[in-house]
Structures are given as structure tokens and as C-alpha cells.
Amino acid sequence: MEPRLAFTETEFAKQYYKNMLANEKLFHTASPVPFTTMELVKLRASQINGCGYCVDMHYKDAVHAGEDPERLNLVTVWREAPAFTEAERAALALAEESARIADNPDAVSDETWEAVRKHYDDEQIAALVAMCAQINAWNRINVILRTPAGFYDPATKTARYRTADKE
């Protein structure tokens, strides 16, 4: 798959991308929510949104930071897997419902909101809500533009695109 547009080479996108990256820096430097939880949120929303680029990135970023790959493999079935804390489950439910807003007339169910409220304070909830909005935006950009998945390097935070028939 080839990307539809060299998005970050357009003048408008350069400015937009700069702001999105500033938000990412905020998540990494000032988030009151643990890094692991934020990566679970990003991974789950990306799975639902069908964003292969972001699934690859957030899986690799989490592993690079020391997360257990087996646990990450269970994110798609988190309800059936005992590998997640109750707080992580609340965050995963929020991630799912934020990616599926059109599926629920209340957007986020009262049950999910109560679970989030039980495990997180206002600052943490603000960070989770912002992260849900941010990852959904990233997913939509990458899905619309058909950004290829794979070959993301967490050490350099870059992707080297290649296809199976050329290295």
C-alpha cells in the first residue's frame, strides 16, 4: 500500500502536525496517567479504527518501554483476559466507546463513565479524554491517507517503508 499524500510535506499539515506533536509531548511529559495505560488506550482505539500504522507503533512503543507483549496481545479481548487492572479496564472501555461514538446515543455510557470516575481523578480523566480524542484524530488521518503499517522503529520514532517484494 502506498500513502495517498505526503501529508507532512504540505504547508498546512506541517503546522497541524507541529501542534499534534506538541500534544504528544504533553502526554509524555505531564500526563497524570501511567504511560502503560496511555499506550493501552492508543492501541485499543487504533485496533477499532483499523489504523495499522498506529497499531504497529503503539504495540512497539509499549514493548520498547518494557510492557509484556503477551499482555498487549490480549488488548483486543481485554474483557476476557485477567491481565488488566480494573483501572486499565475502565480506560480501555473509554477508548472503545470514544472510537465508536456513533454506536451509542450517549457516546460514552454511564457505566463506563462511572468506572472511569471510580479509578481516576479529574486531572487523569482530562488526560484520558484528551488522549482518546488525539488517537482518534491520528487514526483518521492515517486511515484516510492509507499510511502503510509496519516497519516503525520505536528507538528512532520513525518508519522505514518497504514492501514484501523489495527490501
Image: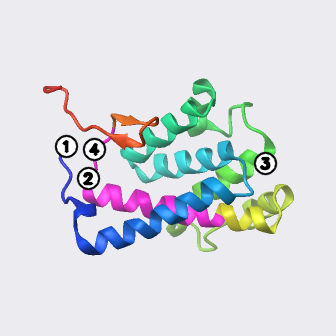
Who's the residue at 64% across and 73% down the image?
A: 106
**Distance between the alpha carbons at the discs numbered 4 and 1:** 6 Å
**Distance between the alpha carbons at the discs numbered 4 and 2:** 6 Å
Q: Which residue is mark 3?
A: 87
Who's the residue at 57% across and 37% down the image?
A: 62
Asked which secondary structure carries label 2, the reply is loop
Q: Which residue is mark 2?
A: 146
Of 76 and 71, the residue lying toward us: 71
**Distance between the alpha carbons at the discs numbered 1 and 2:** 7 Å
**Distance between the alpha carbons at the discs numbered 4 and 3:** 32 Å
User: Disc 3 vs disc 1: Cβ atoms closer than 8 Å?
Assistant: no
User: Disc 1 vs disc 2: Cβ atoms closer than 8 Å?
Assistant: yes
Q: Earlier in the sequence, mark 4 or mark 1?
A: 1
Q: Which residue is mark 1?
A: 1
Horizontal and vertical percent position of residue 149? 32, 41
Q: Earlier in the sequence, mark 1 or mark 2?
A: 1
Quadrant assignment, res 162: top left
